[in-house]
Image (cartoon, rainbow, N blue to C red):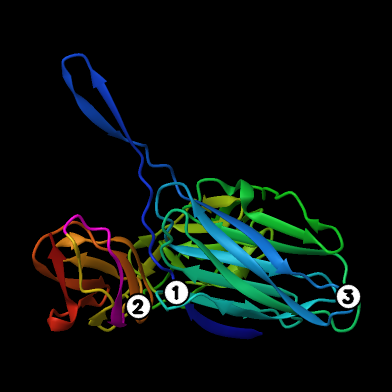
């Protein structure tokens, strides 16, 4: 089993907002904001597919957030290759590192599983470049790519298939998952308990304990995972390309929860000033920033995505000079000259 950690970047983007004005007789014009639609993640693939007798090439897997709301939480991607093709994994993702990206390649090199953790603003696309080798034989069959996210409002475009020799096929909809039970319902707060989640249509899925992904794998009828650390009564949810399903029972943590991470530290802002109306996109640099939230003074930033050493964020409206802080489970970053941001007229 080949496992690696790749860190890449996710530049924050502003959501487009449409304003419509209307007026009534002897009444001042009113302004209405368009309704927010739920996030929807879709997956596509394109690039230089194997053409015999070329021994190796690459193609790109792209996942895009649609709708008008941020897409958050872990997103799981799978790539399955037909006999005669192998991969060593994703050789490229975007940068800098304001999200985390982990991947695992099966021993035979024909399956890539990756988990992207970060916030994706509406309309944002990210991609990984997958290198494949044909080993001197003419490959045939299908390359299948899937994507899954718990917040996905429309799973109809989460399966992409490329048939070698024929091209891309119409995208398919995976069946909705169902969870019938979990084999173990209690475990220590530090995590580490082996848990089997039973159900149907669980293939290409991953398991969340509360909002935290568990390490493990899923077949069509069961997911075998290791519970992460936590506290209290955690819902157990299986997320697949066809949607999400929650177990009828919770997983109850006993004893002390895991120790909190180290406190976040902010060392630099890539942009130190911007208009009072807000909207400036910047990176907050530092350490211990994973899964953080960002505030300008006491006002939360928009479209925030944090990895270990970077957070991307969009400045809210404000005045004067404020400290930009990051808050995680380890606390809130100490303020100082390195985090000062000034609003201009």
Q: Nearer the viewer, mark 2 or mark 3?
A: 3
Residue for point 24% across, 73% down: 326
Labelled disc at residue 52? 3
Residue for point 42% across, 76% down: 191
User: What SS does tag 3 mark?
Assistant: loop
For the residues labelled 2 and 3, the Cα–Cα distance comes to 42 Å
* Circles 2, 3 touching at the beta carbon (< 8 Å): no
Range of magenta residues = 276-288
Front-lying residue, 271 or 149? 271
Q: Quadrant of the C terminus?
A: bottom left
* Residue at far left of view: 320
Residue for point 57% across, 52% down: 179
* Residue labelled with disc 2: 310
**Figure quadrant of residue 265:** bottom left
Query: In the figure, is residue 324 to the left or right of 75?
Result: left
Q: Quadrant of the N terminus?
A: bottom right
Residue 262: where, in percent of width, then height?
Answer: 27, 84
- Closer to the N terminus: mark 2 or mark 3? 3
- Closer to the N terminus: mark 1 or mark 2? 1
* Circles 1, 2 touching at the beta carbon (< 8 Å): yes
Residue 33 visible somewhere in the drawing: yes
Residue 26: where, in percent of width, then height?
Answer: 16, 15
Residue 297 visible somewhere in the drawing: no
* Residue labelled with disc 1: 9
């Amino acid at each position: 089993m080949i496992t690696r950690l790749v860190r890449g970047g996710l530049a924050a983007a502003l959501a487009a907002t449409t304003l419509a004005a209307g007026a009534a007789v002897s009444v001042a014009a009113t302004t209405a904001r368009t309704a927010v639609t739920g996030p929807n993640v879709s997956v596509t693939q394109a690039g230089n597919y194997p053409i015999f007798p070329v021994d190796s090439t690459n193609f790109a897997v792209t996942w895009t957030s649609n709708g008008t709301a941020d897409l958050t939480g872990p997103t799981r991607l799978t790539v399955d290759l037909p006999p005669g093709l192998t991969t060593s994994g994703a050789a490229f993702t975007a940068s800098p590192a304001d999200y985390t990206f982990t991947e695992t390649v099966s021993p035979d090199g024909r399956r890539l599983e990756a988990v992207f953790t970060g916030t994706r603003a509406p309309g944002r696309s990210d991609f990984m470049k997958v290198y494949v080798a044909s080993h001197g034989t003419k490959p045939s069959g299908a390359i299948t790519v899937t994507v899954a996210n718990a917040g996905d409002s429309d799973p109809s475009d989460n399966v992409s298939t490329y048939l070698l020799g024929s091209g891309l096929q119409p995208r398919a909809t995976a069946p909705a998952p169902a969870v019938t039970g979990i084999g173990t319902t209690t475990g220590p707060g530090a995590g580490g308990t082996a848990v089997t989640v039973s159900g149907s249509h669980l293939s290409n899925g991953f398991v969340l304990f509360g909002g935290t992904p568990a390490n493990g794998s899923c077949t069509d009828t069961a997911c075998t995972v290791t519970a992460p650390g936590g506290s209290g009564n955690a819902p157990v949810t299986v997320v697949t390309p066809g949607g999400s399903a929650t177990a009828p029972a919770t997983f109850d943590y006993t004893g002390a929860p895991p120790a909190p991470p180290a406190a976040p530290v902010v060392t630099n802002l890539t942009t130190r000033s911007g208009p009072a109306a807000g909207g400036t996109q910047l990176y907050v640099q530092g350490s211990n920033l994973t899964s953080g939230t960002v505030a300008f003074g006491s006002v939360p930033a928009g479209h925030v995505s944090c990895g270990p050493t970077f957070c991307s964020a969009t400045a809210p409206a404000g005045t004067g000079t404020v400290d930009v802080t990051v808050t995680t489970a380890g606390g809130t970053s100490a303020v100082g000259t390195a985090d000062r941001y000034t609003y201009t007229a």
